[in-house]
Amino acid sequence: MPRLSEVIAALDALWPPERAEGWDAVGTVCGDPDQEVTRVLFAVDPVQEIVEEAVKLGADLLVTHHPLYLRGTTTVAASTFKGRVVHTLIKNDIALHVAHTNADTADPGVSDALAGALDLRVVGPLVPDPSDAEGRRGLGRVCELDHPLTVRELAARAAERLPATAQGIRVAGDPEAVVRTVAVSGGSGDSLFDDVRAASVDAFLTADLRHHPASEAVARTTEATGTPLALLDAAHWATEWPWCELAAAQLDEISDREGWGLRVHVSKTVTDPWTAHAASPESTAGAPN
């Protein structure tokens, strides 16, 4: 069996920590470098529910996309919910490793997994990494459809292929507009509207879109090109979960090559914070009461 330090070295080769944003908190949160690793669990969020799943599974290593302590802390007391996560991990000899923005911009990375889940053909990064001479790494992806779909059909595909959440898929724009090119970005994407406009795509699928940036993005794109930009807003967790399957497959491949015999799992536990959705009645949707 490999030691934790060997598995972490392999993960760092996939997602080098130095490629994470300066504000990010990636890498190993807890774990003994010399402990043996036999079973690994991948998940989006390092929350207690996932940690308890790792305990039940008998995992030695939990790999998550989101950091546990993004802004630092002064305590890991078990009386706090994050402290309880740390205590549970250490008591059960489970290491925690995080790959966040370094996985976002990797090749392949979070947005490649999102595109793959929707059967979109990746053309290149939406925001290229200037340090990548091959032009393959970067934030988000510009994609093409094998055949045109309406916005409504693309939204239905996203709702079907991505994990089910209370939010589902919100749409801004004409549902019957034809889509041939799509920009995708796993996680929060409303800081990328300038790049989306520059890419001249028909639609943008991401998460966490806010009212004012979304409204301005559609209006500015319409004014600039005469062609409205369609926006598809999915749940943050749902747009990043496909990366867990991609990352697990990558580690599986490494394990086979190295003869490690790791057992690699992907959590299907939904950790999206929203738990219910009450839709407006169809007859009154869009009309003030």
Image (tube, helix red, strand yellow):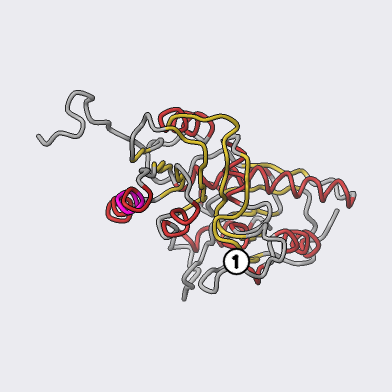
Horizontal side of residue 37 vs 277, given as left or right: right
The stretch in magenta equals 217-221
Count up the numbered dots: 1
Name the residue nearer the viewer: 196 or 63.
196
Q: Which residue has dot 1 on it?
A: 26
Name the residue nearer the viewer: 98 or 50.
98
Mark 1, other Cα within 10 Å: few <14 / some 14–19 / many ≥20: many
Say which residue appears at 23% left-offset and 30% top-offset.
280
**Residue 104 visible in the picture:** yes
Q: Residue furthest top?
A: 283
Q: Could you tell me residue 151's position as x and y percent? A: 42, 33
Magenta stretch prevailing secondary structure: helix
Whether residue 288 is situated above or below residue 26 in the rendered picture: above
Does the magenta segment cover residue 218?
yes
Whether residue 143 is situated above or below residue 199 in the rendered picture: above
Q: Amino acid at mark 1?
A: Val
Q: Residue furthest bottom?
A: 74
Say which residue appears at 71% left-offset and 49% top-offset.
40
Say which residue appears at 57% left-offset and 40% top-offset.
144
Q: Could you tell me residue 244's position as x and y percent? A: 62, 46
Quadrant position of residue 279: top left
**Residue 96 visible in the picture:** no
Q: Could you tell me residue 92's position as x and y percent? A: 65, 55
